[in-house]
Amino acid sequence: MRTRPEVSGHGDPIIFQISGYSNSGKTTFITKLVRQLSKEQFKVVTLKHHGHGGRPDLLNEKDSSEHIYAGALASVVEGEGRILLQAEQAVWTLQEQIRLLSFFDPDMIIIEGHKRADFPKAVIVRDQNDVELLTNLTNIIVVFYWDHSLLASIKTDLPCFHINDENGLFWLKNFLMSGFK
């Protein structure tokens, strides 16, 4: 088991995914989860898959973007304790992204997207079309749904919570924190 989060150098971070199709509420849910975990003094980093196709936009009209356009592999901008990193290579694997975030010695890495990866995950089911995720994805720990009518289609013994049920967020926070006993 892991040590308390206030002890630095505690080892590998807990990695957990929030999965679902586009516009299912993943970003909003992660924001709530990160707020709760941060209140408990956990160091949390997030990793988001840009699922809209193509490359994410660079910070246009900035020197760091000019460095990338000129061929720099990476560009870091720092100001008053905030660092913005822009980096470019043909493909970044999920493992490379996790290693990059590990530099920050986090307690937890929360991944938005990358639903086919095999890390423990919560799945958000927005509508009937999303129910198939529950049979197509691996390592699902908990399900969050938008409409109570979906419960008839969600055939699982896993914990299931409405997306706005604070008990679900509390359950997940406690699940993640249990790795630190």
Image (cartoon, rainbow, N blue to C red):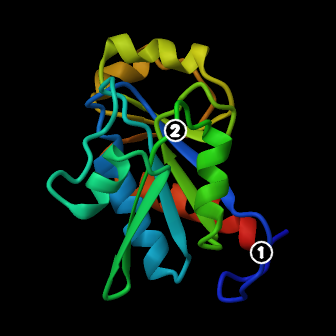
Residue tagged 2? 89
Disc 1 from disc 2: Cα separation: 39 Å
From the top left corner, tell me how far across and down residue 39 is, in percent. 43, 80
Residue at 36% x, 49% y is: 68
Instruction: Classify 10 Å Cα crowding around label 1: few (below 14), some (14-19), many (20 and above).
Output: few
SS under mark 2: loop
Camera-side residue: 181 or 166?
181
Camera-side residue: 46 or 125?
46
From the top left corner, tell me how far across and down residue 80 is, in percent. 31, 88
Residue lying at the far front in this picture: please name it: 70
What residue type is disc 2 on? Gln
Vertical position of residue 119 compared to residue 156: above or below: below
Camera-side residue: 168 or 83?
83
Residue tagged 1? 181
Q: Are marks 1 and 2 in contact (CB under 8 Å)?
A: no
Quadrant, the C terminus: bottom right
From the top left corner, tell me how far across and down residue 125 is, in percent. 38, 27
Quadrant, the N terminus: bottom right
Choose mark 1 or mark 2, whichever is in front.
2
Query: 33 left or right of 56?
Result: right
**Residue 142 visible in the snapshot:** no
Instruction: Classify 10 Å Cα crowding around label 2: few (below 14), some (14-19), many (20 and above).
Output: few
Vertical position of residue 127 compared to residue 27: above or below: above
Number of residue marks: 2
What residue type is disc 1 on? Lys
Specify which label sits upstream in the sequence, 1 or 2.
Answer: 2
**Residue 109 visible in the snapshot:** yes
